[in-house]
Amino acid sequence: MLITLHSNGYEVAVNTMGAELKSFKDPSGKEYVWNSDPAFWMRSSPLLFPTIGNLRNGETTMKGQVYPLVKHGFCKDTEFEVKDLSDDTVTFLLHANEETLKSYPYQFELSLTYHLSDNELSMEYRVVNHDTEEMFYHIGAHPGFMLPVSSGETLADCELVFEKAEDFVSYEYDLENMEFNTEKKVVQKAEGNTLPLTVAMFDSDAVFFEHTNSHRVSFLNTHTGKGVTMDYPDFESIAFWTPAGGNAPFLCLEPWNGSAIFHQDSDIFSEKRGILSLMPEAEKTYHLKITLEA
């Protein structure tokens, strides 16, 4: 079921399935969120929890037992409860249940609140551990945005502008072994705080920066300055992805706390690179903001 938020002509739609952002339109009706065309990618903004990316052989060890856990976790295929709905705000809630316990043996509570204020969409992720043991997890976002281009323009007419200068050294994803490796790095062709976009940079899947000086990045058309800005103050890493080949008219901006499996990681979930944890009855919130640059 779609939930729609409104604020001074701006409109956001979020699906109760996965608490997934499906649309963000300006007052002219222009759409900024990817339309989920299955020819390229059937999703638009999955919530990544309790893992990010893939695990080795699709399974991991938690509480001394081996559990299957799908890529990016189960939230994307799970119906969320709707709480505190108003014209411009909604909270989606998920508790551990019989299904989640089959792949993640923790009693958790997860909520995602969306608040729309004109051209700004604020998102608050809240994780609570109701288990009797320390709980381990990753959390991240994966929103896809339509390329801010006009007829005849492509991805190469766009750029990423960070708030601070970066070294732009990313980890290469090994497609054969489906893992990152700390010894395989790529220096992206960039200068200062600006990273030009090319089709070739996505030949090996996502471009992943494990640590950034910045916690704000803009995805913009180099000619018009239009696009989106994302603030990710509570996320350590960020990745960017579009399907290889450059034919898909969207780009994902993905703030992460965690990542897919690294070659150096063990198969024990609590030992994963970038793992987060909460003690019993502890909680943590993470904030994200998307601003339309029209």
Image (cartoon, rainbow, N blue to C red):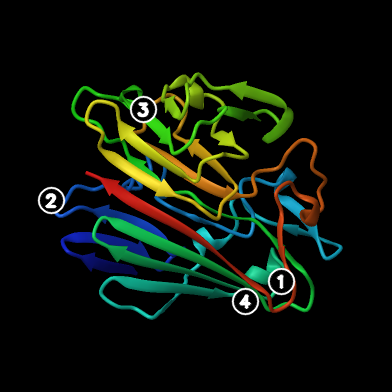
Q: Secondary structure at mark 3?
A: loop
Judged by depth in the image, the label closer to the viewer, 1 or 3, is 1
For the point 37% across and 64% down, the residue is 15
Residue 116 left/right relative to 202: left
For the point 32% across and 51% down, the residue is 291
Identify the amino acid type marked 4.
Asn
The residues tagged by marks 1 and 3 sit, at their Cα atoms, a distance apart of 40 Å
Residue tagged 3: 247
Name the quadrant containing residue 121.
bottom left
Residue tagged 4: 97
Image height check: is 156 above or below 69? above
The residues tagged by marks 2 and 4 sit, at their Cα atoms, a distance apart of 42 Å
> Reading the chain from its start, which is encountered first: label 3 or label 2?
2
Q: Residues within 10 Å of mark 4 (few under 14, many from 20)?
A: few
Check contact, mark 2 vs mark 1: CB within 8 A.
no
Q: Secondary structure at mark 4?
A: loop
The residues tagged by marks 3 and 2 sit, at their Cα atoms, a distance apart of 26 Å
